[in-house]
Image (cartoon, grey):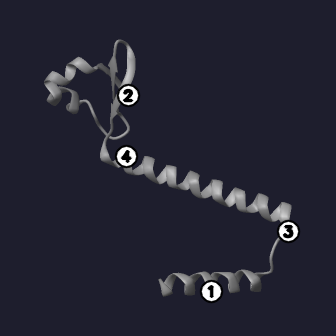
Amino acid sequence: MPTITPISELRNYGTVLEKVSEGSPVYLTRNGHGVYSIRDMNDEENFEKAEAMIRLMCELNAGIRSAEEEGWISEEDFRTHLHARRKEHSDI
């Protein structure tokens, strides 16, 4: 459960940091509006993994849409393309 705290409480930052735990971030407000959040590092890592997964899913969906619009390629053509790309990058 998140904790909402005025940013002015950072004067006693130790007290604010004690409220932070995994799954329970502290949201800092200024004039009643959210400005910052403080999260546990495990929550941050999970957030970054979720962002990466969303980006990957978006790219996969774009590939599927492209294949449906422009046509699919054969497995052999795909393998040839991958081998060519790998060779390009190994030459750099």
Q: Earlier in the sequence, mark 1 or mark 3?
A: 3
Q: Earlier in the sequence, mark 3 or mark 2?
A: 2
Q: Earlier in the sequence, mark 1 or mark 2?
A: 2
Residue at the (21%, 20%) spot, across then down: 9
Cα–Cα span, label 1 and label 4: 36 Å
Cα–Cα span, label 3 and label 4: 39 Å
User: Image check: 80 left or right of 66?
Assistant: left
Quadrant in the picture for residue 38? top left
User: Image check: 12 left or right of 21?
Assistant: left
Residue at the (40%, 17%) spot, across then down: 33
Q: Amino acid at mark 2?
A: Pro
Q: Earlier in the sequence, mark 1 or mark 4?
A: 4
Between marks 4 and 2 in the image, the one whose residue lies nearer the viewer: 4
Which residue is nearer to you in this view: 2 or 60? 60
Quadrant in the picture for residue 71? bottom right
Badge 3 marks a residue whose secondary structure is loop
Residue at the (38%, 51%) spot, across then down: 45
Cα–Cα span, label 1 and label 2: 49 Å
For disc 1, the neighbor class at 10 Å (few under 14, some 14 to 19, many from 20) is few
Contact (Cβ within 8 Å) of mark 3 with mark 4: no
Q: Which residue is mark 3?
A: 71
Cα–Cα span, label 1 and label 3: 21 Å
For disc 4, the neighbor class at 10 Å (few under 14, some 14 to 19, many from 20) is some
Where's residue 78, x and y in %? 72, 80
Between marks 1 and 4 in the image, the one whose residue lies nearer the viewer: 1
Badge 4 marks a residue whose secondary structure is helix
Cα–Cα span, label 4 and label 2: 14 Å
For disc 2, the neighbor class at 10 Å (few under 14, some 14 to 19, many from 20) is some
Q: Is residue 43 above or below residue 1?
A: below
Q: Which residue is mark 2?
A: 2
